Amino acid sequence: MDFDSAYAHGFARLAACTVPVALADPARNAATVVAQARECHDEGVAVALFPELCLTGYSLDDLVLQDPLLDAVHAALAEVVAASRELRPLLVVGAPLLDGNRLHNCAVVVHRGEVLGVVPKSYLPTYREFYEARHYAAGADVVGRTIVVDGTEVPFGSDLLFRATDVPGLTVFVEVCEDLWVPVPPSSRAALAGATVLLNLSGSPITVARAEDRHLLARSASARCLAAYAYAAAGEGESTTDLSWDGQTMVYECGDLLGETERFPDGPRRTVVDVDLDRLRQDRLRQGSFDDNRRGLGIERADWTEVEFAVDPPTGDLGLRRKVDRFPFVPDDPARLAQDCYEAYNIQVSGLEQRLRAIGQPQVVIGVSGGLDSTHALIVAAKAMDRLGRPRSDILAFTLPGFATGDTTKDFATRLSAALGVTFEEIDIRPAARQLLADLGHPYAAGEEVYDITFENVQAGLRTDYLFRAANQRRGIVLGTGDLSELALGWCTYGVGDQMSHYTVNAGVPKTLVQHLIRWVVSSEQLGAADAEVNELLRAIVEQEITPELVPTREGEQPQSTESSVGPYALQDFTLFHVLRHGARPSKVAFLARHAWQDTSHGDWPPNFPDERRVAYDLPEIKHWLGVFVRRFFSSQFKRSALPNGPKVVGGGTMSPRGDWRMPSDAAGTAWLAELDRVPDA
């Protein structure tokens, strides 16, 4: 496996280019296009898109009907075709071409010294500033045809798909400008027929707010079509007699903006990105309504003309031309993070509200440890009581110290409960735990320092047992506090343990998001502006190391660390997102994780992320913890299969067997571990 190459992991490099145009000078424009095509080749690009009518200029008006110009177009095309023999990219350029008695506004697809096909513009704008029907024929009904270019008969029509034979999943469709503005764009039907990369050559002039409209349409097309959508507009050199041009280029993938260039550039510009073809395929595989739509419309791939080409992708490390978030569940943009936290918190709060209303407004019983998860569940419960108009004293918070409970966390739990005004009690589980260990004949009861899984789970189970019995006694329900990451890794005690509750509010929240939710609750004053002590405690709690506090700390040792057992939650949440949301192979997860995590100075960090926690991970570490993830993920499904009710929170997915994730509890991860072996050890 060529592990370092993005092409080996399902990516294809795409360029959306804008170039200065010399009006009515095809030879000069061809030279400009070829120069950009060579640079795209050097960057490892597979597909390069250029603007509408870039070989002549879009704003020619009646000059486009002149024979000298049309003759020059063919000569210019011949130059582009000849130059393409030594170039890797599939080149898509705009030119006017004659077909019988009519002129068409065309996208000419060129590769390795050949014109592979010509796509006419389907829909012609003839309103406001546009007058295309004066010069061109519409091409929506041109299918299954051929056209002669430079003496060679080539496919011609709006039904052409260009499929790469050596880059799996790369199937290109081309439409021209206005085609995207109609209610049913040709690209929509092409995507249903199998196109994954949709290209738009545009000559769109710029007016105030039109750039936003283009973003809206391209983003929507990529999201609805589960495709990549690239857009390249005309810019410098077009006539400003009555209009202006901004040379906008951008590429979207499934609604996500991968890249764009500055507008109104001086000179050529290009957006170069790596499109994730695996993601497109996986999304279409999962979203069955996509293919149902194809069947409902009677779209068959056999009805389309497929033209094959070979990219001959480069080998080795080309880098990765796309942003890879270290924390895919946590946006880097402060405004987006605040919006996500608002939605996540209110999903949790409203879910608990509805459950309490539906079952007769019981009290809420919750175990509080002073750690992140129970703290967040507690402030969700407090907000739910506020919104229901009930006193926070209806929340019965219990701290249940065991053999390794620290003074700091216990103090946090005690003080936070008092500051929130909930009902608070302490039950020391150590006497009961000692008795249970003695009854079991456990070595600890005889004074031996044996801290095995039984020792840990006796404590975890007793805590849950006390909470359930307290709920029985006081007409309450037990509120679960465990999070999505713990469920994925099986880091919870099954049955009579923290895996079980009457209702769980954190089960849809990944560990890496919890601290940001708590910070947002503080900054947005969700619990009241006057709660200064609450806010101070919450800020302190999010700074703690994550620990289950089940094993006593010997002198000179570090306290028990969750992440030393199950792996850094930053890495494991990274893996969880790409496995759960995109079905990514372990080798691809490792490739992406290396790009995201190998250098602390590269890429963005979430807002307010502490400098001292900004760490890097090398490939051997990434591979090791990926193996831990796979083994724990497969061995722990039985815990997820019995998951209590709780709301889905993040778009990345949930572990509920009634929601996003259904899996047999006795499946083996052998194939995943074998695939992970493809990752180099160094």
Image (tube, grey):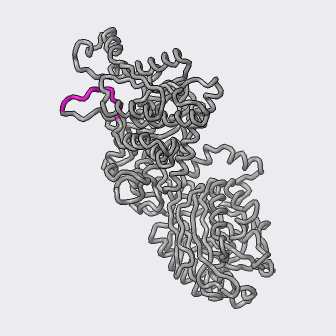
Q: Name the magenta segment's main secondary structure.
A: loop
Residue 479: x and y in percent read 51, 27
Question: Which residue appears at 54% of the width and 82% of the height?
Answer: 32
Residue 487: x and y in percent read 47, 33
What is the span of residues highlighted in magenta in the rendered image? 547-555
Of all residues shown, which one is farthest toward the front?
530
Let me know if residue 620 appears in the view: yes
Q: Is residue 525 left or right of residue 132?
A: left
- As rendered, which of 482 and 399 lies closer to the eye? 399
Question: Which residue appears at 67% of the width and 56% of the height?
Answer: 191
Question: Which residue appears at 28% of the width and 23% of the height?
Answer: 451
- As rendered, which of 21 and 470 lies closer to the eye? 470
Residue 593: x and y in percent read 41, 50
Q: Residue 224 is drawn in which quadrant? A: bottom right
Residue 577 inside the magenta-drawn segment: no
Residue 307: x and y in percent read 64, 63
